[in-house]
Image: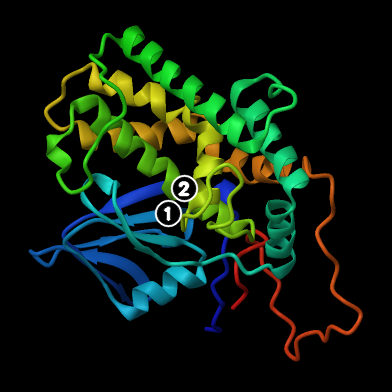
Amino acid sequence: MSFIPLKPIPIKDRVSMIFIQYGQIDVLDGAFVVIDKAGIRTQIPVGSVACIMLEPGTRVSHGAARLASQVGTLLVWVGEAGVRLYASGQPGGARADRLLYQARLALDDDLRLRVVRKMYQFRFGEPAPKRRSVEQLRGIEGARVKQTYKLLAKQYGVVWHGRSYDTKNWSAGDVANRCLSAATACLYGISEAAVLAAGYAPAVGFIHTGKPLSFVYDIADLFKFDTVAPLAFRIAAKNLRDPDRAIRLACRDIFREKKILKRIIPSIEEVLAAGEIEPPKPPPESVPPAIPPAESVGDSGHRST
């Protein structure tokens, strides 16, 4: 039987995410498996998942990390309930032209403002106020976000004292903030997977800046109030014994219902196109690779193996 090399499939055709806790992840007989303390094996269809969130108590073998990279699945090491990021794999971001295009848009003040204005319009369904700087639009956006949280709390009958949480003491936060943090972490995970799959850099943001996931936050915010924010308040209102688990399951369902994975990459291209420039072409003196990369059915940023 001949060997068939593994290739990534497009993000839009995948399951959004799964969480794994307290288990050894390895590759056995060519399959990606989780082995619990009792030795029970659970096979994970790694190539059909956009993002795997690895919680405390999880160990990953070299073979498992390699297989995830081959099929373009993002591995994210997180804290309790997924709200604190420790590290992440990078199965994408392999397009120099996309990275240079993104960097040019972010470095030019006029182009950056165009992109920010488009993000504002995308998020709130109306044009951004005229003659406003990026900093001013960020302030207007922040005020609208606070007001939206108040309205959602009122709609679902949840006591709300503002956005506040302590990543070092997760249980100390109120239920509404915990639900919102857990739901947002889920959205950040699949947004990072999409940003990398599209060939862009997570750190080069437009509204958010100076953080390793600035662009991820920019893109996730485009969908937050259409998906996870109302969901978080709805779950918080139920006073469940385990709201963190309920949030994860509900996020998975709403991502599927809203077809988020099919929308993220086209939305990235849409907001960046507001800069009205083209991605750079290779310089005349550029030399093609000695070994041409293999064709891939995955997204632009997925590495060919």
- Quadrant housing residue 81: top left
Q: Residue 187: image x %, image y %?
A: 43, 41
Identify whether 246 is placed above or below 31. Answer: above
Q: How many marks?
A: 2
Residue occupying image coordinates x 50% and y 20%: 144
Instruction: Indicate the secondary structure of the residue bearing disc 2.
Output: helix
Query: Is residue 8 depicted above or below 158 in this figure?
Result: below
At 61% from the left edge and 46% from the top edge, which residue is drawn? 206
* The furthest residue to the left: 38
Q: Quadrant of residue 23?
A: bottom left
Using residue 60 as the reference point, say whether residue 252 is left or right of it. Answer: right
Q: Amino acid at mark 1?
A: Cys
Residue closer to the observer: 99 or 104: 104
Q: Nearer the viewer, residue 84 or 263?
A: 84
Numbered disc 1: secondary structure: strand
Q: How is the image coloured?
A: rainbow
**Seen in the image, is 277 located left or right of residue 70?**
right
Depth order, front residue of 228/275: 275
Residue 159 percent location from the top left of the image: 23, 14
Is residue 282 at least partly visible in the picture? yes
Q: Amino acid at mark 2?
A: Ile
What residue would you read off at disc 2? 190
Q: Using residue 213 as the reference point, say whether residue 94 is left or right of it.
A: right
Identify the residue position indicated by label 1 in the image: 51
- The residue located at (39%, 19%) in the rendering is 149
Instruction: Name the residue at the right extreme.
Output: 284
Residue contact at pointers 1 and 2, CB within 8 angstroms: yes
Residue 298 picture quarter: bottom right
